[in-house]
């Protein structure tokens, strides 16, 4: 079971929002202080999915993602984008600092 499915099964009333087309970039859920949990996405994986989905070069994908995803506030359920990520894919890619 994917982590987002497990999380939403445990919190069926949670109204967190998703980023359409980027489910494979979900690496968990998290919250601040008393706020509700929201989905956490790996920035590196988002970039890779964006490159594949839209046939973009890396810098084009970064520009697209920074403007349209990282720069978008869509309410209290807005996902967290993890930049200093140590997921297996980031470690495999040698990327932990973007
Ligand atoms: Zn990652």
Image (cartoon, rainbow, N blue to C red):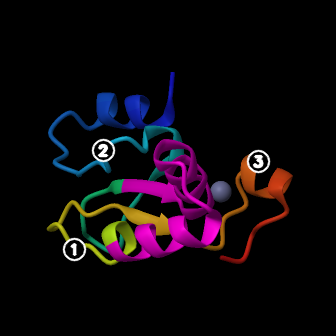
- The residue segment tinted magenta is 39-67
Residue found 52% across the figure and 64% down from its top: 61
**Direction from residue 78 to residue 30 in the image, left or right:** right
Residue found 22% across the figure and 73% down from its top: 73
Residue in front for this viewpoint, 54 or 23: 54
Q: Secondary structure at mark 3?
A: helix
* Distance Cα–Cα, label 1 vs label 3: 28 Å
Q: Position of residue 42 (x, y in %)?
A: 56, 58
Residue found 39% across the figure and 29% down from its top: 5
- Find out whether the residues at labels 2 and 3 contact each other: C-beta distance under 8 Å: no
Residue found 56% across the figure and 44% down from its top: 52
Q: Position of residue 40 (x, y in %)?
A: 45, 56
The secondary structure making up most of the magenta span is helix
- Find out whether the residues at labels 1 and 3 contact each other: C-beta distance under 8 Å: no
Rendered position, 57 above or below 63: above
Q: Which residue is mark 2?
A: 20
Q: Secondary structure at mark 2?
A: loop
Instruction: Identify the image quadrant of residue 66.
Output: bottom left
Residue in front for this viewpoint, 8 or 62: 62
* Distance Cα–Cα, label 1 vs label 2: 15 Å
């Amino acid at each position: 079971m994917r982590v987002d499915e497990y999380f939403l099964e445990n919190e069926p009333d949670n109204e967190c929002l998703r980023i359409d087309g980027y489910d494979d970039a979900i690496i968990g859920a998290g919250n601040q202080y008393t706020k509700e949990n929201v989905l956490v996405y790996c920035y590196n994986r988002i970039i890779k999915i964006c490159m594949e989905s839209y046939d973009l070069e890396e810098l084009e994908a970064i520009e697209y993602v920074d403007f349209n995803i990282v720069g978008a506030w869509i309410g209290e359920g807005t996902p967290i984008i993890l930049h200093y990520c140590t997921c297996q894919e980031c470690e495999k890619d040698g990327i932990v600092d973007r």
